Image (spheres, rainbow, N blue to C red):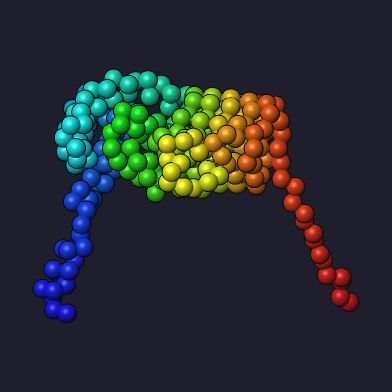
Amino acid sequence: MDKASIIKNIKEHKNQPNLRFELKERTESFTNRLFYTLFDIDTPVDENLDLLEKEFDALVNLACWQVDKPCQRVWANFVVRLPQILEKLNLDAEAIVNCDPASLSIEEVYMAYPGFYAIAIYRLAHELYIDGFPLVPRLMTEYAHRQTGVDINPGARIGNSFFIDHATGVVIGETAIIKNNVKIYQGVTLGALYVAKKLQKTKRHPTIENNVTIYANATILGGDTVIGENSIIGGNAWITESVPANSTVYHSPIIKIKTLPHVS
């Protein structure tokens, strides 16, 4: 096959007219600028809000493929909510510094904790998600996923003072509900019991009530599964049904240690 035929065949198979990876790259730039605008003390808020609006207009042109969708109004709705989002994120940072004995300062949490970064990008993306802005919220949280190992779908609903410790391997599904003062550790999955396209519009992921702690590698599945308030879920637990309030759930592995006798 000659070069002309290869080019022709590739063009014939490039059949997604809206697939522009420029959208992904611009979303990542927008996400970075947004994070710095909210947190970096040397970043001028007034100038950056103007730059963010221009960047957002570019995202609208790339992401809003149906002309009847009012994407232009999304920025106006989003920007007025930024102070409230920042207030929530400051509560998240305080929860981390108060709960983690390894944290040396609040500044360390903002700059070095992957769990905080993942929560921050989730909260920003979630506001765009609920406004119906297509694809960009998912690209934002996937960018954070790539940076931190934390996969939070922008559709999840998460309350105040959320703490993810160590972070790597955490998965939180689209319809999960997490209420206030919840702490989770690395490797936790809040997932679906069944994966089928027909379940797209149903609640597939669990509800976590106030003041719950979920330790490393626990898996909690199902849209009807509710973890009652003040409960503790131990590491490696596998849960597919509801847990009453004030419960402790733990996995009991069978561990056998075999030692060789001393050889003289």
Query: Where, quadrant-wise, is the C terminus in this rendering?
Result: bottom right
Q: Looking at this view, name the residue that lies furthest to the left.
A: 4
For residue 118, what is the image quadrant?
top left
Labels in figure, total: 0
| 30 vs 10: above or below | above
Residue 28: x and y in percent read 28, 43
Residue 255: x and y in percent read 77, 56
Q: Nearer the viewer, residue 92 or 151?
A: 151
Residue 17: x and y in percent read 18, 51
Q: Is residue 213 left or right of residue 58?
A: right
Q: Residue at x 75, y 47 (%)?
A: 252
- Using the rendered image of the protein, determine whether residue 58 is visible from the camera's viewpoint: no
Q: Nearer the viewer, residue 157 or 86?
A: 157
| 21 vs 90: above or below | below
Q: Looking at this view, name the residue that lies furthest to the bottom.
A: 1
Q: Looking at this view, name the residue that lies furthest to the front.
A: 198
Q: Residue at x 61, y 37 (%)?
A: 214
Q: Residue at x 83, y 70 (%)?
A: 260
- Using the rendered image of the protein, determine whether residue 142 is visible from the camera's viewpoint: yes
Residue 104: x and y in percent read 53, 34
Query: Where, quadrant-wise, is the N terminus in this rendering?
Result: bottom left
For residue 4, what is the image quadrant?
bottom left
Q: Residue at x 25, y 47 (%)?
A: 25
Q: Is residue 130 left or right of residue 170?
A: left
Q: Nearer the viewer, residue 220 or 194?
A: 194
